[in-house]
Amino acid sequence: MDLGVGLKDHPLGPDEVRHFLAGNPDFLLHDTALMAELGLRPDAANVVDFGPAALARVHEAHKKESKARKHLEATARANFAAQAQTHGAVVDLLDARNHADLARRVDELAQLRFGLAAGVVALEGPDRTPAGWRVMAEGQIDLVIGHQRVALMGFQPTALGLFGERAGEIKSMAMVRMAIWEPARTGLLAFGSSDEHGFTQDMGAELVAFLARVVERTAERWPVL
């Protein structure tokens, strides 16, 4: 049987090639050109050893697999760490004694738990704003994150004023709208990062939104006097 006969008219499939090689074990060993092309070399009378090219391909495949596995492991560790820090942050927020203490705790957990530059709680006027909270003009949140938009991730120059004296450090932000008390007043939970890639537009806002809900419920314990 000639392996090359009829290839143009009837290309061989993998099963046919396998069947041919099984019935003609010497075919591959005796074709030195094909062996070299495949990166194989004869090591003994009936043993095929991997040559440098084949070993290089195997090594490269192993490196890619190892890199992918390490990436998945690192992502899993980061997610686990973020969840653990979030659970701790919730406990911290629920322990707040008043509005001012709540705002202080938001800023502290931003820095100590998440490595950020600042955390801010803000509330739109014109009515009274709790001590320690940033005051925003009525309708200002729409201007900062967009009309009827719930969250914004990335950099927003018009939000720098929220961070007071630390505004110069802020290179990216995560902001989520809040509705507190009844009738509802519009508020904003904002975190600022000194890393321009700390918060980007393609990031999900689920974690920040979850913390915003915790701040809402905690703030509603006390009226704005």
Image: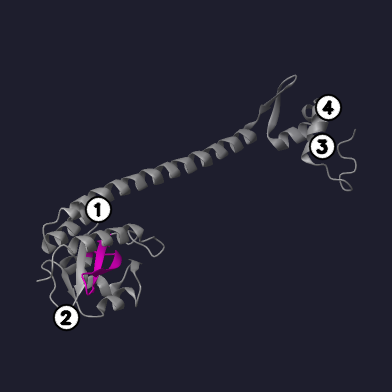
| Residue type pointed to by label 3 | Glu
Q: CA distance from mark 2 to mark 4?
A: 89 Å
**Viewer-proximal residue, 167 or 79?**
79
The label shown at residue 16 is 3
Considering only vertical position in the picture, is 178 above or below 91? below
Marks 4 and 2: in contact by CB < 8 Å? no
Point out residue 91 in the picture as x, y percentages from the top left corner: 21, 50
Which residue in the structure is indicated by mark 2?
A: 126
Looking at the rendered structure, the kind of residue marked 2 is Pro
- Name of the residue lying farthest toward the top: 45
The part of the chain drawn in magenta is: 169-194
Residue 67, label in figure: none
Q: Residue at x 23, y 64 (%)?
A: 216
Q: Which residue is mark 4?
A: 23
Q: Position of residue 64 (x, y in %)?
A: 52, 42
- The residue where tag 1 is placed is 115
